[in-house]
Image (spheres, rainbow, N blue to C red):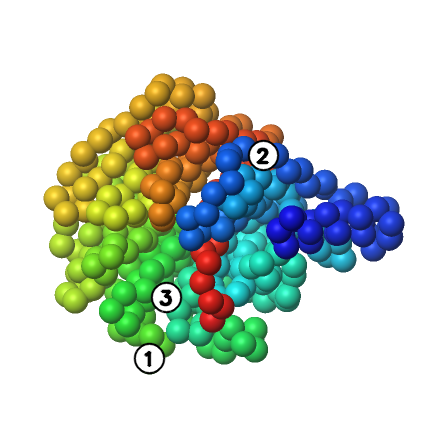
Amino acid sequence: MRYFHIVILSLMLATTFTSCREDIYIHPSTSTEVDAPRITGVEGFYLINEGNMGSNKATLDYFDETSGMYHKNIYAECNPHVVKELGDVGNDVEIYGSKLYAVINCSHKVEVMNVADATSITKIDIPNCRYAIGHGGYVYVSSYVSPVQDDPKAPLGAIFKIDTVSMKIVDRVDVGYQPEEMVISNGKIYIANSGGYRAPDYDRTVSVVDLRLFEVIKDIDVAINLHRVKRDKNGMIYVSSRGDNAFIPSALYVIDPTLDRVVAEVDVPISDMWIHGDSAYIYSSARNDVMHTTTVSYSILNLNTLRIVDDKIIKDGTDANIKMPHGIAVHPITGEIYITDARNYVTSGRIHCYTPDGVLKWSQTTGEIPSQFAFKTQTAPI
């Protein structure tokens, strides 16, 4: 039996015979065999489930590729001493070195765990935190800074810099309004500013932060209500605009980090994307508040030509069973595609695994609103 399984089982027994939480209910974990065991160089992945805002139901799942077992809601039983469990709204999850960082938005914290077994190391208080990325011995976390509420007078957001040895915040830099995802390329952080709290007066910039100076050196004008940011193997940067859910559609923009300017626009609706090789795997659940409609689509974008080469990721018709896609990932070795389904946003979600050819391989129930992935590879800790 692998170490991760031993930890889970021992902690289940611990919660049975101790009273760490007295009368506080611990949401039980479950383990289900969904695939055949295999060795690919990837041990598995963590999946964070947001949980509905205000419900304190953020949870963490783990798929162990070496055993084929899917472990649902592992955090509570791995950490029986944490009274309030993971917290309110799990917005992101990031593996960097030997640690796992879960960004818990409305609990205003980053939960730091051991990547081997999801046991808690510490928590770092960051207001209205959004996304995390690790680089050069630090983890950078984007933050709205302001309270969780629409406010046209909300202050500028920020990036917080965490030392991964001391687990302390060592610096911060102010960026645009309500910053979201970020990537690192060419010695710089590129962060998408949404201005979501200031609608309809959205922000439309990507802030460029010099890593050495840790200060903003440029704001690139892109489009309104920016959200996702990814980079390809050549360092090119892809930024999504959510539009305004009415008259301005969602689209994708390409930034050249050697020029620090937009060099291309792709007319494709986008909620999230995952870059694998020379392709971007994209899903969209485009809402139109004027027409009161939501249009779901899936596509594959060739990053060399910036053309849609396939408007169907799922080829066997099982996409009809997905009510509301909310997350996407591609296995770095096998090319298998994972798509999550938030369903109605208040009950358990689902994760679906597809072959690279788009045929359903397995499905599994998750926590509420399954979202972001972090693949655990067999590499030495940083």
Q: Residues within 10 Å of mark 3 (few under 14, many from 20)?
A: many
The three-letter code of the residue at mark 3 reads Val
Amino acid carrying label 2: it is Glu
Check disc 1 and report its element: helix, strand or loop. Answer: loop
Location of mark 1 (residue):
212
Counting residues from the start of the chain, the first of labels 3 and 1 encountered is: 3
Q: Secondary structure at mark 3?
A: loop
Q: Nearer the viewer, residue 149 or 356?
A: 356
Residue 243 point in image, percent of width and height = 30, 41
Disc 2 designates what residue?
A: 33
Residue at the image position 24 percent from the left and 44 percent from the top: 279
Residue 320 found in image quarter: top left
Camera-side mark, 1 or 2: 2
Can you say whether 330 is above or below 212 in the image?
Answer: above
Q: Is residue 371 left or right of residue 348?
A: left
Residue 113, visible in the rendered structure: yes
